[in-house]
Amino acid sequence: MTDQHQPEPSSAPAPDLFTWEFAANPYPAYAWLREHAPVRRTRLPSGVEAWLVTRYGDARQALADQRLSKNPAHHDEPAHAKGKTGIPGERKAELMTHLLNIDPPDHTRLRRLVSKAFTPRRVAEFAPRVRELTDDLIGRFAGRGSADLIHEFAFPLPIHAICDLLGVPREDQDDFRDWAGMMIRHQGGPRGGVARSVKMMRGYLSELIHRKREALPAEPGPGEDLISGLIRASDHGEHLTENEAAAMAFILLFAGFETTVNLIGNGMYALLTHPGQRARLQRSLAAGERGLLATGVEELLRFDGPVELATWRFATQPLTLGGQDIAAGDPVLVVLAAADRDPERFADPDTLDLSRRDNQHLGYGHGVHYCLGAPLARLEGQTALATLLTRLPDLRLAVEPGELRWRGGLIMRGLRTLPVEFTPQGENGT
Ligand code: HEM
């Protein structure tokens, strides 16, 4: 645990946050914050002021603190910032009812219902489909000797995977690809296109759920899709309403898409820039072992995970965190990326060690909102990285690392493109 007192103010100048330089490598700025101002009130690019929490102990505590609500209605929003904060749910009432915007007991009820349908077993049964999708995507560029791993691989894999899992018919999945592309491309930029895409997705899902409900057989058949499972799920005789099921399907898509793009993108980038670790993983895969792959993907989540800041939380009453007083109504943002490099918790935190054992990272969050999709994310991340390294063994970056551009969004951390080269592979994989 961290000590509970704010350190003495330092004479070292505070780093600039949210610049392009910061987006490329936020870790030195986070080290400064952890040391000098671990719970710090900060003006965000949107103009909203929020508390940034950067130490591991404080971060874990904040994520589990029931006095910090996920409901944006608790935000004491200044009049001049009304509607401009970019805080989801403050603008669109229809987005309010999903898991990441509600608290217990409503959250407990919805999470219990979805957990009955989105089970680890369902994910395990989905493994062959993820392998098939992965192989198919790699097959499209393997013969060319070059690719952009974000657009041609990391991006389509999770969108098709979640669509398949939910039961979105294949012929409609290209629409989802377009809507998701709009959402990811325009993040941090103009919101009109994003809002339109969200609306289209929500509309489509509501209609699909309605259709599936009408045609639902009395007993579940083998391989029944997740939307049918959501409609069927019941707890003490309670079911999800059609609206709740649509909000749930939407949050599964929304929460499981860009995160997985970034797990594959950031993870592959880290491997390509740490040749010793990458060679170790390739040797272990060639020997038919999976142990290093499993610990390795967890380490990649800790080292440079997809979710830089946990989603918004709001103080429902005055509280003290890390020795800092926080007023009721104040927004709090837990910086997972800073907490996961805290030297008080992790030995050599800036070193990538794929075999790290003591690795209780916060990349999937903590507490009641802990990532519901973690088993699927692990399956996709492990399959994607292992298959790339096995099928394209001499994969290398096609540009200098300094030329790569990172997306400037607040919550997520990920690359815009990841150009790579490799020896072209023949039809039979040679
Ligand atoms: C919640 C990370 C993939 C569905 C979360 C949270 C984190 C996270 C940090 C908690 C946010 C908070 O407390 O503010 C990740 C990472 C992923 C990933 C790093 C990929 C590598 C997925 C996938 C799905 C998913 C594939 C589903 C298909 C969800 C849902 C929640 C959530 C529904 C909300 C849970 C709740 O509020 O009870 N995720 N996620 N995630 N994640 Fe993930």
Image (tube, rainbow, N blue to C red):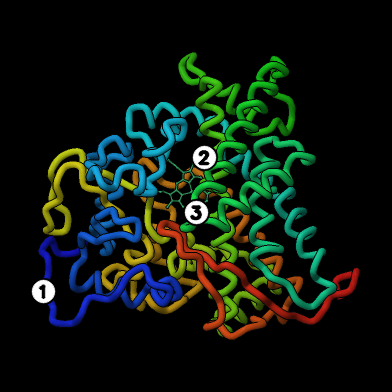
Q: Looking at this view, is 379 or 139 the one in front?
A: 139
SS at mark 1 in the image: loop
Point 70% across, 41% down: residue: 164
Dividing the picture into quadrants, the one containing residue 274 is bottom right
Residue 366 seen in this snapshot: yes
Q: Earlier in the sequence, mark 1 or mark 2?
A: 1
Q: Which residue is mark 3?
A: 190
Q: Earlier in the sequence, mark 1 or mark 3?
A: 1
> Dot 1, crowdedness within 10 Å: few (<14), some or many (≥20)?
few
Cα–Cα span, label 1 and label 3: 38 Å
Q: Which residue is mark 2?
A: 251
Q: Is residue 75 left or right of residue 266?
A: left
Residue 349: x and y, percent?
36, 75
SS at mark 2 in the image: helix
Dividing the picture into quadrants, the one containing residue 231 is top right
Q: Is residue 211 left or right of residue 300?
A: right
Say if 302 sits above or below 159 in the image: below
The answer as to whether callout 2 falls within 8 Å of ligand 1 is yes
Q: Earlier in the sequence, mark 2 or mark 3?
A: 3
Q: Amino acid at mark 3?
A: Pro
